[in-house]
Amino acid sequence: MNNAFPIEKRKPQAWTFVEMLVAISLSAIFLGAAALVLQAITVNSKRLTSLIEVTIGESKKLNFYGQSGDSLRVYSAPNYGRLLFAKDLRTTLLDDVDRSSAVFCLPRSIDNSIRPEFLRYLPGDDGSTLSHPQLDSPEAFRRFLADVEPTSAAIFDTSIRNVPDPNKPNTTIFLLAPESSPSFIRVHAVYEIDFVTPTNIAGDYISVRRYKNGTLTNYYDIFHHSGDGPSLLPSFVAFESESRLATTEGESIDRFKIAPESPFYFLWLPDPSINPQRNPAWGTTYPSDTARNAYGHLSENTSMLTVIPMFPSI
């Protein structure tokens, strides 16, 4: 059966000259706007951050990174690219805590060289008791470390209870792991936070690093130009079990006895997106009988607050 109205095949139509002119004009407008946006982003990025060279000394560069030379290049805060590195390291830290049996934070003023894989934990002479006291606080661990690693006594030379000595701005964090041998303690990882004053520029070079068996595995760094803002210290505060309130030791110590179960730390990692030295202080004060009196100024100076149990569950 023939169709009364046969279907007519249409030929494909090309763009007209007018349509091409309109398309080219619109493309030029969009590309021009995109170029302006990119230029604004680039200008603002250069205004907000910069890559600078700092001189920290050959011994520190070798101790931190195993590299020769006395200077390195680092971004100054605020820098949101370095913030990604900081968040990655914090995630690794929390994963390490989950694999640990104990965490001890120790303050220091000089470089640390104690990053072992094992610590010797010898039994007593009769083989029935341990020659070292129970490791139930940062101070107990510091004294134990001085026994088994004698060179550590000069590095961690100040007792620690709750708040580090302000003259000891740097921090080493020992994460201990379960070990089948009763004669040894395994060190799962060592983290370090160092504040260094460069010799060629006013401000603080800050380095946060992770070591495994003495080898550097992860780090981030940032530079804070000097200013009138508050300090980014202390890096940590230790809270004790509330059961220790049974012994009154004074307001400065008892205010930290608030842990209902396991003792824990507040740990503040440097935030690359903020330079506290150029961030005006809020001026908020807290009563001396509260723990917050020791660290309240940090609340507006870093978003990298981390809560870490001293004895994690494994």
Image: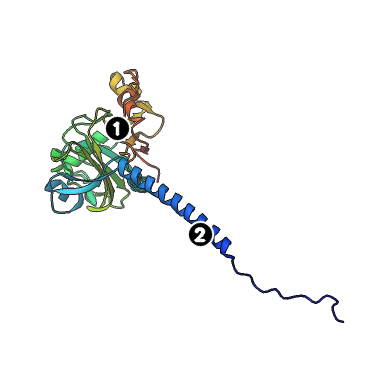
Q: Amino acid at mark 1?
A: Pro
What's the distance in space between the residues labelled 2 and 1, CA to CA? 50 Å
Q: Residues within 10 Å of mark 2 (few under 14, many from 20)?
A: few
Residue 238 rendering spot, x and y as whole percentages: 31, 32
Cβ atoms at labels 2 and 1 below 8 Å apart: no
Q: Residues within 10 Å of mark 1 (few under 14, many from 20)?
A: many
Numbered circle sitting on residue 99: none
Residue 302 rendering spot, x and y as whole percentages: 34, 35
Please indicate whether residue 187 sits to the left or right of residue 15 in the image.
Answer: left
Please indicate whether residue 287 sits to the left or right of residue 2 in the image.
Answer: left
Q: Residue at x 80, y 77 (%)?
A: 6
Please indicate whether residue 6 sits to the left or right of residue 281 in the image.
Answer: right
Q: Amino acid at mark 2?
A: Ile
Q: Is residue 194 visible?
A: no
Q: Residue at x 31, y 52 (%)?
A: 180
Residue 235 lies, with reference to residue 41, above or below; the image says above
Determine which residue is flagged by label 2: 24
Colour treatment of the image? rainbow
Determine which residue is flagged by label 1: 276
The answer to which image quadrant residue 254 occupies is top left
| Quadrant containing the N terminus in the rendered view | bottom right
**Circle 1 SS class:** helix
**Circle 2 SS class:** helix
The answer to which image quadrant residue 264 occupies is top left
Residue 133 rendering spot, x and y as whole percentages: 24, 37
**In the image, farthest residue toward the front:** 18
